[in-house]
Amino acid sequence: MVVGKETAPMEQHNASTTADSEIQNKARLAILELANMISVPMSLNAIVRLNVADAIWQNGSNSPLSASEILARVVPSGGGDAHNLERILRMLTSYGVFEEHLSPNSSNHRYSLTDVGKTLVTDTDGLSYAPYVLQHHQDALMRAWPRVHEAAIDSTTEPFVRANGEPAYSYYGKKTEMNELMQRAMAGVSVPFMKAVLDGYDGFKGVEKLVDVGGSAGDCLRMILQKYPSIKEGINFDLPEVVARAPPIPGELNFFFIVLNFF
């Protein structure tokens, strides 16, 4: 008969203590990452402001560049701090925005765009997800975030109103630059999405009148009408300040803008 050796109580205790310690260490690291999470969107915001994605892309080459080479393209007049830019690039590399390339014979790190990073590249229509990044990190919105807890205390509290004195869409309507940025952001997101929808969805066949509520500048509705000329009428509802700045629609499309506050 073979008798197995039982684990001594002290060994069991030590193993349990070690496991608990590892769990606690992971928890501490996780909360530290969450506490510093603002560094991610702020670094992304910096990359967009510097137009780094277009600088790397260069008409589709996406050739790996060092921080110094990128800086030379985004600040052609010279100057800047390549070391600080590289810190931003390396941090966003860890979140899948860039791919880092290490040279075996050099200490230089070079960076190219991943599929995530390519969404920030300006396409042939002049669109990208870059304005969406900027729109979500404007000063007016950033002022509202520290007040989010107030909405849990008082359900009538709107953090944006508390921070800026009026509702967001009213505020944007009075700020031409912010309004234009929002429209570029919406177009940058909705146009590629609608292209994908139209490639795989044929539910607009047989439709005679189509209404888009909150259609912004009308990009999605215009794309649908262009693919389905059988639609006799397209109506785009949105706020007056949005409609006022919407681009002209080709005359062959039976397309109408109507002002409507649907909030």
Image (cartoon, rainbow, N blue to C red):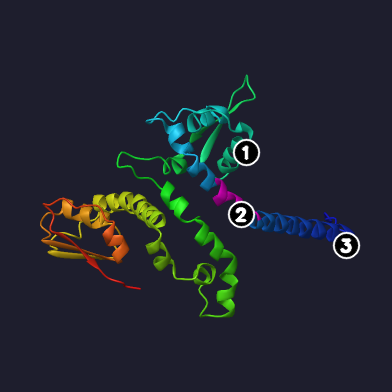
Question: What secondary structure is marked by label 3?
Answer: helix
Disc 3 crowd rating (10 Å Cα; few below 14, some 14-19, many 20+) is few
Crowd band around label 2 with a 10 angstrom C-alpha radius: few (<14), some (14–19), many (20+): few
Q: Which residue is mark 1?
A: 87
Q: In the rendered view, would you say 44 is above or below 70? A: below
Q: Which residue is mark 2?
A: 37
As for residue 40 lying within the magenta part, the answer is yes
Instruction: Name the residue furthest top.
Output: 105
Q: What type is the residue that disc 1 sits on?
A: Arg
Q: Which mark is residue 9?
A: 3
Residue 81: % across, % down = 61, 33
Q: Nearer the viewer, residue 222 or 193?
A: 222
- Mark 2 secondary-structure assignment: loop
Describe residue 124's horizontal placement relative to residue 34 as left or right: left
Q: Earlier in the sequence, mark 1 or mark 3?
A: 3
- The stretch in magenta equals 36-43
Which residue is painted at 58% across and 74% down in the image? 150
Label 1: state its secondary structure: helix
Q: Going 36% across and 52% down the picture, which residue do you hit? A: 189
Q: Residue at x 59, y 79 (%)?
A: 153
The Cα atoms of the two marked residues, 1 and 3, are separated by 49 Å
**For discs 2 and 3, the disc positioned in front in the rendered view:** 2
- Toward which corner of the image does residue 124 lie, by quadrant? top left
Query: The N terminus appears in which quarter of the rendering?
Result: bottom right
